[in-house]
Amino acid sequence: GDGANQKIDYVFKVVLIGDSAVGKSQILARFARNEFSLDSKSTIGVEFQTRTLLIHHKTVKAQIWDTAGQERYRAVTSAYYRGAVGAMLVYDITKRQTFDHIPRWLEELRNHADKNIVIILIGNKCDLEDQRDVPTEDAKEFAEKEGLFFLETSALEATNVETAFMTVLTEIYNIVN
Ligand code: GDP
Ligand code: MG
């Protein structure tokens, strides 16, 4: 838990990026509070949320930043990326356009963030298999070409959300140790 007298060994800043409505805020709600909402406005205005966990017996505070709607205006600023050691690049598996925009987001990241940032590509809403518009293989191929981790998640069903964060945080941990 987040006990007041808990000793924190590391604080890792991780940013969520990707088109509007792909599920970034709900992925964060699932990870930080184990919650999910169908109301996409529920977390607007929240800059970041934290969750403290153990990685290799060390206490790591994950500070996860959410764009809070700025992505609609392409107004994600360099302050958002400053100090980030991890990034989650999210698209919606039911909306091809959100996957087609991933190279643009990746370029944004590579322009603004630290060059050693750990990046995971996430295809969210995998519970909507019957509406799938992005084959898993396309994303896997892209991720391999760009050297990114890759997972499909469902914030709704809590599929792979924990694994996605643990993949990024453990890799960051391994880099700093
Ligand atoms: P954001 O704009 O990227 O932060 O997207 P939100 O987190 O606000 O989610 C946009 C909409 O997609 C909301 O109505 C969510 O309830 C819904 N949503 C988010 N994640 C999932 C998911 O894994 N499965 C399904 N079916 N819907 C989701
Ligand atoms: Mg949001």
Image (cartoon, rainbow, N blue to C red):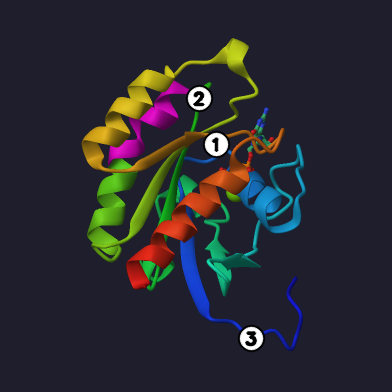
Of callouts 1 and 3, the N-terminal one = 3
Asked whether, in this view, residue 85 is left or right of residue 23, the answer is left
Q: Nearer the viewer, residue 131 or 50?
A: 50
Name the magenta segment's main secondary structure: helix
- Label 1 and label 3: CA atoms lie apart by 35 Å
Q: Residue at x 28, y 30 (%)?
A: 142
* Residue denoted by label 1: 22
- Label 1 and label 2: CA atoms lie apart by 9 Å
Whether label 1 touches label 3, CB < 8 Å: no
* Residue denoted by label 2: 93
Of callouts 1 and 2, the N-terminal one = 1
Q: In the rendered view, tell whether residue 4 sits above or below residue 173.
A: below
Q: Nearer the viewer, residue 175 or 34?
A: 175
* Residue denoted by label 3: 7
Q: In the rendered view, tell whether residue 3 sits above or below residue 23.
A: below
Where residue 38 appears, as percent x and y from the top left, is 75, 37
Whether residue 85 can be seen here: no
**Based on the displayed image, in which of its 4 quarters is residue 131 positioned?**
top right
Which quadrant of the figure contains the N terminus? bottom right
Q: Is residue 101 magenta?
A: yes
Q: Residues within 10 Å of mark 1 (few under 14, many from 20)?
A: many
Asked whether, in this view, residue 78 is left or right of residue 37, the answer is left
Label 3: state its secondary structure.
Answer: loop
- Three-letter amino acid code at the position of disc 2: Ile
Q: Residue furthest top?
A: 130
The magenta segment: 95-103
Q: Nearer the viewer, residue 18 or 62?
A: 62
Q: Is residue 71 magenta?
A: no
Q: Residue at x 43, y 66 (%)?
A: 173
Whether residue 41 can be seen here: yes
- Three-letter amino acid code at the position of disc 1: Val
Label 2: state its secondary structure.
Answer: loop
